[in-house]
Image (cartoon, grey):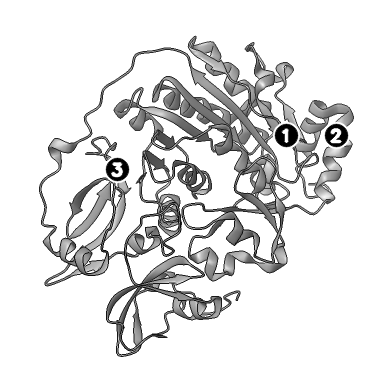
Amino acid sequence: MDTLGLPKDFEEKMKRLLVDEFDDFLNGYSIERQYGLRLNPVKASAEMLERLDFITGKVPWAEEGYYYDADARPGKSPLHEAGMFYIQEPSAMSVSEMADIKPGETVLDLCAAPGGKSTQIAGKMRGRGLLVSNEINSQRAKILSQNIERMGIANAVVLNEDSYRLSERFPAFFDKIIVDAPCSGEGMFRKDPAARDEWSKEQVLVCADRQKEIIRNAFNMLKPGGIMVYSTCTFSPEENEQVIAWLFEHHDNVEIMECRMYKGFDSGKPEWTGEYSCDNISRTVRLWPHKLGGEGHYVAKLRKTCGEGRKYNTGENKRKKIDINMWNEFKKECLKDLKLSGDIISFGNQLYCIPKEMPDLSGLKVLRPGLQLGENKKNRFEPAHALAMALAADEKREYGICSDVTVIDMNIQSAAKYQAGEIIECDENLKGWVLMAVNGISTGWGKATVGKVKNHYPKGLRRLKNMNI
């Protein structure tokens, strides 16, 4: 390691690659990095976010991306827990933007944890279509599922599967696929010093082999005419240009598409493709931390030019009829005029609303089959926290699930107490289930009786101290 804590072999490699630009690159490690967060349009508006005093500017390449003052620690705010925004590295926001996601599409985020790109995709889908968020690591998949819930996403399925198993089940199924491939993490050295300790030349080659397998499986799942965006947070040509060139060597129905370029963006390097040649590799994009307000990233936008389309059974014939009487009673009492898009299924006593586009998932490891509605208990229906997070607390909200629901809208201080599990006072005339909100953003359930709200914020999410209010 040198005085900057960088591996010696890494420095030597970057010096060979960058030549005259190497000194500028190295000096970038002495510059304080910038911090980013992304508005969740499902739950809040840009005007609401821009009023917050810790927002310092816009991320140019991300529609909902903002820079923030790190000293403010917005991740500890009740608004963060309510799903108003997602803390995300600014360069990473470029990936989902490149995919040009549209409402109503079928989209796969193949290596999705912890959920930054999935939640960004969901914001662009506006609750329409099917988002499949997959993560092979079971612990990381749980974190992914929690973030899907926190951001109020109703049309997502969370899986814990290997890319090969998915490619066998869903050939030519998806309109758009995001492959943010596991990598050697060189682009995160400034952000995450621990990544420096784990790096080696051998690890780069191991990652490259794994990336080729993943991108091959992903390409198999893409519809003819579909778009795949491949990305890494590393500088190594072996994991970037050479992976794309390898794909071209093995498939004659793929083309590299133009990406919108912003100040500080750089082109992929034809001279870095290794043993394979690849037309238009300069259309891929490199983000260098010494050139822009973000960390290191590589992005390639690919299109499958032709191939055989497939028809899929959505699994409707396997969806057994279930008892939804208690759900209907709860809906009639508490959620008048509720508009849900999807089919209701049961997992034991738990009810879920699943996207109509969802294929048969039998035999796969499913963590979240859609929007969790709640649980049939002995004589009643108890609503799920996920349902509360997906509901629009403000009737003026354009997105989110709309319903005529009783809302208790708290200020930041009261919301911090609620999220810590405390009882909240309310109008003595209120009775029954109420939607708790902070500044017009839903954050959980409560049950009103005799001037107090019994707290139904999940115990596992309660934050007893150090809330930033």
Q: Which residue is mark 3?
A: 355
The residue depicted at 36 percent of the width and 50 percent of the height is: 154
Q: Mark 3 to mark 2: distance in Å?
A: 49 Å
Expressed as whole percent of the image width and height from the top left, the position of residue 421 reads: 42, 80
**Amino acid type, callout 3:** Pro
- Neighbour class for label 1 at 10 Å: few (<14), some, many (≥20)? few
Q: Mark 1 to mark 3: distance in Å?
A: 35 Å
Residue 445, quarter of picture: bottom left
Residue at the front extreme, as displayed: 396
The image quadrant where one finds the C terminus is bottom right
Q: Earlier in the sequence, mark 1 or mark 3?
A: 1
Residue 272, quarter of picture: top right
Q: Secondary structure at mark 2?
A: helix
Q: Secondary structure at mark 3?
A: loop
Residue 183 visible to the viewer: no
**Amino acid type, callout 1:** Tyr
The residue lying toward the viewer, choosing from 195 and 438, is 438
The residue depicted at 73 percent of the width and 49 percent of the height is: 190
Q: Which residue is mark 1?
A: 262
Expressed as whole percent of the image width and height from the top left, the position of residue 47 reads: 60, 58
Q: Earlier in the sequence, mark 2 or mark 1?
A: 2
Dot in front, 2 or 1: 1
Indicate whether 320 appears above or below 35: above
- Neighbour class for label 2 at 10 Å: few (<14), some, many (≥20)? some
Q: Earlier in the sequence, mark 3 or mark 2?
A: 2
Residue 290, quarter of picture: top right
Q: Which residue is mark 2?
A: 22
Dot in front, 3 or 2: 3
Indicate whether 112 appears above or below 220: below
- Neighbour class for label 3 at 10 Å: few (<14), some, many (≥20)? many
Instruction: Determine whether, in the image, residue 233 is placed left or right of residue 455.
Output: right
The answer to the question of whether label 3 and label 2 lie on touching residues, with beta carbons closer than 8 A, is: no
